[in-house]
Amino acid sequence: MPKRIAAFGEVMMRLTVPGHDLLAQSSMLSYSFSGTGVNVASALSRYGHDGRLVSRLPDNPLGDAAEAYLRKLGVNTNRVLRGGAYIGMYFFENGFGLRPGRVTYSNRQESSFNTAPAGTYDFEGIAGEVDAAHFCGITLAMNDTVREAMKAFARAVKERGGKVIFDCNYRPGLWGDEGYAKAKPHYEDMLRLADIVFMNEKDAIHVLGLPTSRTSREEQLEELIPVVAERYGLQAAAGTHRSIQSDNRHSLKGYLFKEGAFVYSDLLSFPVYDRIGAGDAFASGIIHGELEGLEPQRTVAFAAAAGMLAHTVAGDTPMASERDIVRAMDQAVRDVER
Ligand SMILES: Nc1ncnc2c1ncn2[C@@H]1O[C@H](COP(=O)(O)OP(=O)(O)OP(=O)(O)O)[C@@H](O)[C@H]1O
Ligand SMILES: O=C(O)C(=O)C[C@H](O)[C@H](O)CO
């Protein structure tokens, strides 16, 4: 049955340098609008749910363009407010071979979303309208007012019996020096409120400071995720392990931990066209499976295939339909469809 899911987060204007040029070389940029909340609300809408964004855009032609773009992505914009002066931006340079891709943020703290004063949003009203709400560690990294708003919204959803979904999405560049120490208490607050969490052992070790006696990533994951789930009372935790080869291929394996057991997707290996937002595609697949009550094995396979497909499309926002994903789950490489 379709569900109503709110995603709380900033709309970012993505400015992409064409091809594999550097900003210093190119005189052209193409723009689109994204952000973790946008990506998740859009993907869930594509799977038949009502994905609504809770955000704030400037009341000017940039805000108009962003809102029109969100509608094209299928996002319900009824709870997108107008106010403030700027939209957050990031510049993206595609990597090639051994040169990694690069993201440079601009005007983020000045954005309409990040300058919204306390009391801007009707969180109680929104919480009463939805089955679940999605939050992410990128938003948590912004400033105290945004952090307080995020926690207040999560509390309102929880108090009304909705599911709280939290994607750790730790971005070292956003937390600055001593980032882990600054982030930890806020991550702990969100984990206490959360039902479904996206994370892997890196979050547990570095952000939460949990000790591990194991050396391989897989063993660390299996040791630490049950500890986190128990400590914070999580319904489910999920995430991916990614490995990167030098020939522009990545490998991805998804996991889902619930009711004391791990299930894993196959190890998927694929060439990468655009990597940004793939984590949001995986997360949306898990959220869909959990909200629909799918078998854990099916959910993690669906989410991993959604994540894989997101690497094949330009832009941050997953564009695959449920049908596309189910077809990709058999991993056969197909000829053009005509
Ligand atoms: N330096 C770090 N310290 C702590 N945790 C990290 C660090 N880098 C990544 N993580 C965590 O590892 C997990 C996977 O992160 P990664 O950056 O690979 O994202 P992803 O989910 O594959 O993709 P996306 O960038 O689309 O979200 C996330 O839960 C993230 O919070
Ligand atoms: O909000 C940000 O920081 C972004 O970089 C926007 C992207 O859509 C997001 O990171 C994808 O997960």
Image (cartoon, rainbow, N blue to C red):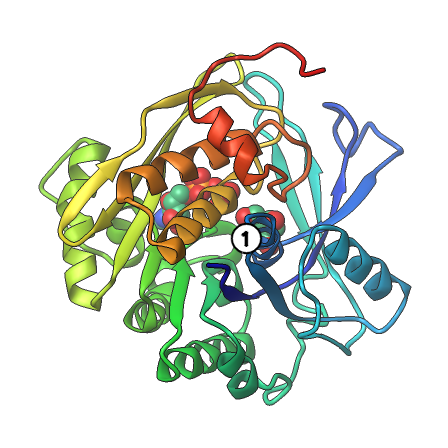
Front residue of 39/186: it is: 39
Residue lying farthest front? 1
Please indicate whether residue 138 sits to the left or right of residue 115 in the image: left
Picture coordinates of residue 133, whole percent (x, y): 47, 68
Q: Residue at x 89, y 33 (%)?
A: 27
Q: Going 76% across and 25% down the picture, which residue do you hit?
A: 21
Q: Quadrant of the C terminus?
A: top right
**Relative to 298, 74 lies left or right:** right
Task: Name the residue beneath numbered marker 1.
Answer: 44
Residue at x 19% of width, y 42% of height: 262
> x%, y% of residue 44?
54, 53
Picture coordinates of residue 300, whole percent (x, y): 34, 39
Helix, strand or loop under label 1: helix
Vertically, is 191 above or below 70? below
Q: Quadrant of residue 132?
A: bottom left
What kind of residue is marked 1?
Leu
Does residue 80 sit above or below 310 in this rendering? below
Q: Is residue 111 left or right of residue 216?
A: right
131 and 154: which is toward the camera? 131
Determine the image quadrant of residue 6.
bottom right
Q: Is residue 105 above or below residue 254?
A: below
